[in-house]
Amino acid sequence: MTPLTVAIIGRPNVGKSTLFNRLAGRRLAIVHDQPGVTRDRRFADGRLGDMALRLVDTAGLEEAPADALETRMRHQTERAMAEADVVLMLIDARTGVTPMDAHFAQVLRESPTPVVLVANKCEGGAGEAGLYESYGLGLGDPVPLSAEHGEGLALLYEALLPHEAALHERQAAAGEAGAPDGADAAGAEALPPDLEARAMAGAEDDAEPEPDDPGRPLNLAIVGRPNTGKSTLVNRLIGDDRLLTGPEAGVTRDSITVDWTHRGRPVRLVDTAGLRRKGRVTDSLEKLSVADTLNAIRLAEVVVLMMDADMVMDRQDLTIARMVVEEGRALVLAVNKWDAAADREATLRRVRDRLETSLAQVRGLPFVTVSALQGRNLDRLMDTVFEMHARWNVRVSTGRLNRWLAGMTGEHPPPMGKHGKRIRLRYMTQAKARPPTFAVFCSRPEDLPDSYVRYLVNGLREAFGFDGVPVRLFLRKSE
Ligand code: GDP
Ligand code: GDP
C-alpha cells in the first residue's frame, strides 16, 4: 500500500516531535533526506496499526534560525499543504486553545488539504477543558491523544481511515498499482492494544480501574444546601474544629484544601473556602451559592451531596445532583440527620422514587444515611466514596467492548435509518476514563434514536459496573 502522507503541524511545544517519534517507531526514527528534493524536505516512514504512513517532518522547520515565528508558521503550513494527504493539527489540551492555535486553524480552514484536529496531552483524562474548547476551532471533532503515553492511537487511526481510503481511491482512479511493500514493517510502532483488539482477537481481560497511584489523594468535595450539615461532617471527618473556629477575617485565599486519610488512603477535601464562607453566615435564609458549588464540583473527583433527611431530594438537591453529573464527576448522596429523621420509611421511599423519576440518566446512584452530628455511618460513606472513585476510573479493553457491542446489537438490532438502510454500529472504544467516555463508530449517527443510545449506556452500566457513574457516549461517523 502506498503510505498516507501525514504532516504534523502546530505551534511549538504542543508535542509534534513526540507524536512524530511515536508514529515513526524507534528503529525508523532516523529522518532521511529524500533524493532529489531540497534539504529542508524531510520524511520518515511510520505505521499506525496496519496503516502505512509517510510523515512529513515539520519539526525540523522550527530549527531554521532567525525566522520570525509567523514566517515559520506560514512555511510550515504551506509545506504541509503541498506535501501531505492529510494534516494533523496539534494543540496542547492542557494549555487550551491559544491565539497561535487559532491562527494555524484559520490558515488550515482555508487550505484544500484535509485536517484532523488532535488534542494532545490528554493522558488520564487530563485536558478535558482544552479538548472541548478546541471544537471552536472549526476543524471538526478533536481526537483526544497522549503522544507521550501512547493513549488515543486507536481514535487517531479511525480518524485517518477515511483519508487513507480517499488516497487509495485517487490512486485507483489514476491507474496506479500501489505496489505492496511489507518489507519495512519491522520497526514501526507496535500495534496499539486497542487496534489489536479490533480484530476481535483481544486477550480476555476484565474491566479494570486505572492503577491508582497510592500516594495521590482522592479529591473530594462536599456540597449541598445551607444547613444540611456539611461543616459538621467535615469536622467529623478530619477530627478537629479547624474549619469553623471563629471568624477568620484574614482569610482571602479562594481555595483551601484539607488532607486526611481514610483506612490509610489519602483524601483531599477541596474548596473548603466555600464551606468556610457559609459557616460564617448566620442568616438562616442564606441562599445556595451556585458559583461556590460549581467551583467545588469542578475541583473534585467525587462529590458528596449532603441532604437533610426531613427535606430530602428537594428541587435544589436535584439541581446540584444534575450539576455533578453534567460535570462528569462521581456522585454520592448523603442523607444526613438520620438520628433526628421524622419518618425514616417515608424518607427512603422518597429518595428511591426521586432517583428513578428525576435522576434516571444515572441509574444506580448510591445513597448513604448518616448522622454527621453523632458520627454515624461515616466509614460507610467514605467507603462508598472510594468505591465510586474506582468505578469512575474503570477502563474497558476494546476487545471486550466490541464483543459486548456485538451481543447488544444482536439482541436488539439498531433500527432502519431514514433512507431505509439499517444503521450499523461498527466498532467502539473507550476514549477515556474519569468519567468513562466511549466512542461508537456508526454508519448514520444522525439517525440513531436516543432510545437506542440509552439502551447502550444502560447496558454499559450493567455489563461493566458503571452503576451510578456518569457515562458518556459519542457517536462518530464511519462508512
Ligand atoms: P513540539 O515543539 O511541538 O515538537 O513539542 P515536543 O514534542 O518537543 O513536546 C513538547 C513538550 O511536551 C515536551 O516536554 C514533551 O515531553 C511534552 N509532551 C509531548 N506529548 C505529551 C503528552 O502527550 N503529554 C504530556 N503531558 N506531555 C507531552
Ligand atoms: P452547613 O450549612 O451545611 O455547613 O450545616 P452545618 O454543619 O452548619 O449544620 C447545620 C445545623 O444542622 C447545625 O445546627 C448542626 O448541628 C445540625 N446538624 C448537622 N448534622 C446533623 C446531624 O447529623 N443530626 C442532627 N440532628 N443535626 C445535625
Image (tube, grey):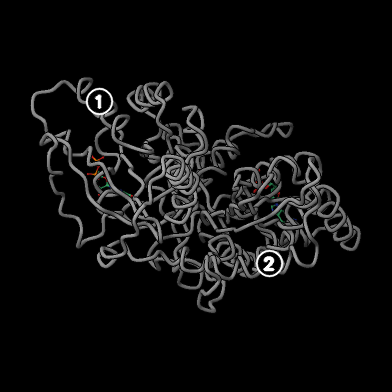
Q: Nearer the viewer, residue 244 or 315?
A: 315
Q: Does residue 69 show up?
A: yes
Which picture quadrant has residue 333?
bottom right
Using residue 197 as the reference point, say whether residue 444 is left or right of it. right
Whole-percent x and y of residue 318?
A: 76, 44
The reply to whether the residue tagged 1 has its Cβ within 8 angstroms of ligand 1 is no
Classify 435 as above or below 208: above
Q: Mark 2 — residue?
A: 406
Q: Earlier in the sequence, mark 1 or mark 2?
A: 1
Q: Secondary structure at mark 1?
A: helix
Name the residue type under label 1. Met
Classify 304 as above or below 101: below
Q: Nearer the viewer, residue 220 or 226?
A: 220
The label number, if any, that marks residue 73 in the structure image:
1
Q: Residue at x 82, y 47 (%)?
A: 358
Whole-percent x and y of residue 145?
A: 41, 49
Q: Does residue 91 show up?
A: no
Q: Secondary structure at mark 2?
A: helix
Whole-percent x and y of residue 267?
A: 47, 60
